[in-house]
Image: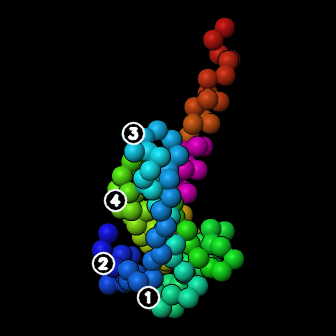
Amino acid sequence: MSGPLVIRGSVSVPEAELVWRFSRSSGPGGQHVNTSDSQVELRFDLATTEALPPVWKERALERLAGRLTAEGVLIVKASEHRSQWRNREAAAARLTAILAQATAPPPKTRRPTKIPRGINERRLRVKKQRGQTKRGRSGGGWD
């Protein structure tokens, strides 16, 4: 992993703002499982970053409030692969996806539409015809 992480468009997080930690991963491994630090923990200080525009930063802090530490640090862990390099790539991809989703603009509000009068009148006319058809089926006159 080298270079900045591109969030969306021209906005990216520089490598200097990312803190990597490595530890032994749990689960199955190979012969070197007890000696290699393959689990990756990626930390990004969202509260003090200058890489994101202020509006995006505010939006991300609000949406990710439950995931952040008390200091405003976002932590992403990856240990699904046996190699540290692939876990680094997975953690970086996960961080960019989380930040892209958290900084996305809110969806447009839906404007309720009115039902056209012609559609409503046609529905009532068909309903009345159907009622007359059923009324005509009731007994009488067949004796």
Disc on the earlier residue, 3 or 1 = 3
Measuring from the top left, give residue 82's x and y in whole percent.
Answer: 39, 48
Inspect the image, locate mark 4, and give the three-letter code of the amino acid beneath it.
Trp
Q: Nearer the viewer, residue 136 or 22?
A: 22
Considering only vertical position in the picture, is 81 above or below 112? above
Considering only vertical position in the picture, is 68 above or below 132? below
Disc on the earlier residue, 1 or 4 = 1
Disc on the earlier residue, 4 or 2 = 2
Q: Which residue is tagged 2?
A: 3
Q: Which residue is tagged 4?
A: 85
Helix, strand or loop under label 1? loop
Disc on the earlier residue, 3 or 2 = 2
Q: Which of 23 and 128 is in front in this view?
A: 23
Inspect the image, locate mark 3, and give the three-letter code of the amino acid beneath it.
Gly
Helix, strand or loop under label 2? loop
Residue 2, by quadrant, is: bottom left
Q: Which residue is tagged 1?
A: 51
Considering only vertical position in the picture, is 120 above or below 104? above
Asked if residue 118 can be seen in this view, the reply is no
The stretch drawn in magenta includes residue 123: yes
Inspect the image, locate mark 1, and give the three-letter code of the amino acid beneath it.
Ala
Which of discs 4 and 2 lies nearer the camera? The answer is 4
Residue 100, by quadrant, is: bottom left
How far apart in space, not on screen, are marks 3 and 2 (Cα)? 31 Å
How far apart in space, not on screen, are marks 1 and 4 (Cα)? 25 Å
Disc on the earlier residue, 1 or 2 = 2
